[in-house]
Image: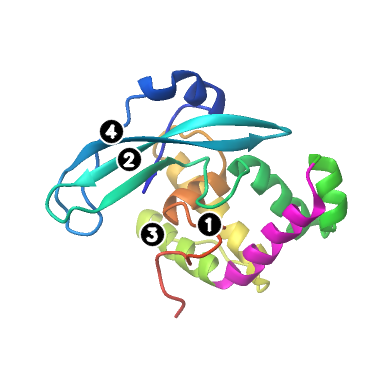
Amino acid sequence: MVWVCRLGVDAYQELGRQLDVPRFDCPRCGEPMILWGWYDRYLRVATWCKRVWIRRQRCKACRRSHVVLPQFVTNGRLDEMSIIAEGIEAMVMTGRGARRVGEDLDLPHTTVRDWRRRFRSRAVALATGIAAAVVAFAGTLPRLSADPERAALQAMAAAWAAVAARRPITGSAVCLANAICGSHLLSTNTHPPWAVP
C-alpha cells in the first residue's frame, strides 16, 4: 500500500516511529485495519543511505498484514524515487547511456541499467494504466508518443498535471505514478496492478 506522504525524506526519517501514519482499509476485503508495528529499511538518497521506519497494518477480518510505504519508496529498490526518476528521464528523454547517467548520479551503472531495463519491460503497461487513471480523473488525455517509454513518462506528467490542478502536491510525476502503481513502479517481482489490454 502507498501513503501519499507530504513529508520529504529527511522529515520522514527524523520523525522515525513518531510518524502518524493514517489507518487504511484492507485492500483485500475492505475492512478497517489496525496498526501492526514497524520495520526498518534503508533508503539511498544521493550517495547517503538513510534508515527509515515503515509502518505495518493488519486486517482483523482476513488476518493479512500490509506495509504502508510513502510514495518516495518503491518496493524492492534501495534508491529514493526522485533519484530513479532523474535517471530514467535522462536515459529515455535525452538518450544518454546508463554509464554516463550513473556517473552523473554517482551510482553504479549496473543499478541505473537495471532501472532502465525494468522500466522498458513495463512501459506499455505503465503507459496504459496511468493513462486510464488520467482519463478517469481528468476526463481527457493529451496525445502520447508512439514510443512506449516516452508515452509512459508523458502519461505520468499528465497525471501530475491533473492532480496538481485540483490540489497542492509534492514530489514528482514519477513519485505520483509510483503511488498509482501501489509502489510497484519498478519493483523486482510484481507488475503494476492492472493487466495490459
Q: Position of residue 45 (x, y in %)?
A: 65, 34
Please state which amino acid type lies under the numbered disc 3. Gly
Mark closest to the chain's N terminus, 4 or 3: 4
Residue at image coords 44%, 49%: 179
Please state which amino acid type lies under the numbered disc 2. Arg
Quarter of the figure with residue 3:
top left
Mark 4 and mark 2 residues within 8 Å of each other at the beta carbon: no
Q: Nearer the viewer, residue 154 or 78?
A: 78
Q: Which label number is shown at residue 22?
A: 4
The magenta segment is 107-124
Q: Which residue is mark 2?
A: 56
Inter-mark Cα distance, 3 to 2: 35 Å
Left or right: residue 35 versus residue 194 is left
Inter-mark Cα distance, 4 to 3: 29 Å
Residue at image coords 28%, 33%: 22
Mark 1 residue element = loop
Left or right: residue 53 versus residue 119 is left
120 drawn magenta: yes
Mark 4 residue element = loop
Q: Give neighbour class at mark 1: few <14, some 14-19, many 20+ (Cα, 10 Å).
A: many
Q: Which label number is shown at residue 154?
A: none
